[in-house]
Image (cartoon, rainbow, N blue to C red):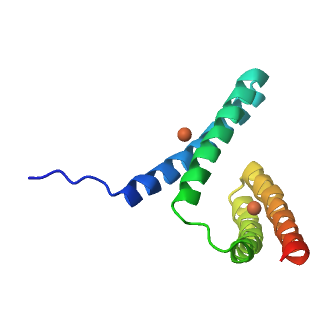
Amino acid sequence: MTEQTATLEECVNTEIKGETWEVVHYLAMALKADNEGMTEVAQTLRNIAMDEAAHGSRFKYLAGNIGDLKEEIEKMLSGEEQAYEGKHEGVKTAEAAGQKQVASTLHTAAHDEARHASMLRNLLKRYF
Ligand SMILES: [Fe+2]
Ligand SMILES: [Fe+2]
């Protein structure tokens, strides 16, 4: 039986997924470190997370996954608007489950998504 080697596209996609997961995981570790009073540990973990984000974004860019900038911004705008709605729905679900912190985080994140949407709308208006 011959061993199948991954294509370059599969390698790049694996890297993007791995780096993306690492960003979230390192930032969550940093949050835990902050909450446990270890500020320097938190800062170091955040620095690593930013490196991982840079790796993932470079792979994504090199893979040709970023198209026309105006269309990309419009697509992201639509995603941010949907994320706002979805997170607001999630607040109700979390509240019904008695998960106040999750509900609160969803509420805050929903407003962040709305802010992201308005920033993107502003870019479209000013530059495209
Ligand atoms: Fe990395
Ligand atoms: Fe967002």
Image location of residue 84, percent across then percent down: 77, 69
Please tell me which residue lies in front, 22 or 128.
128
The image quadrant of residue 118 is bottom right
User: Where's residue 54, x and y in %?
Assistant: 64, 45
Give coordinates of residue 106: x percent, y percent.
76, 58
Q: Is residue 37 visible?
A: no
Q: Between residues 87 and 23, which one lies in front from this camera angle?
A: 23
Q: Quadrant of ligand 1?
A: top right
Locate residue 36 relative to residue 20 in the image: left or right.
Answer: right
Left or right of residue 26, residue 102 in this image: right
Q: Is residue 40 left or right of residue 125?
A: left
Point out the residue furthest to the left here: 1
The answer to which quarter of the image holds residue 68 is bottom right
| Image position of 56 with respect to 85: above or below | above
Picture quadrant of residue 110:
bottom right
Above or below, 108 relative to 40: below
- Residue 101's place in the image compared with 75, above or below, is above
Q: Residue at x 64, y 39 (%)?
A: 51
Q: Residue at position x 76%, y 49% from top? A: 101
Is residue 104 visible from the viewing direction of this image? yes
Say whether residue 2 is left or right of residue 102. left
Is residue 56 depicted above or below 110 in this figure?
above
Relative image position of residue 92 (x, y in whole percent): 75, 66
Q: Closer to the camera, 23 or 62?
A: 62
- Position of the C terminus by quadrant: bottom right
Count of marks placed on residues? 0
Identify the residue shown where x is 72% and y is 69%: 83
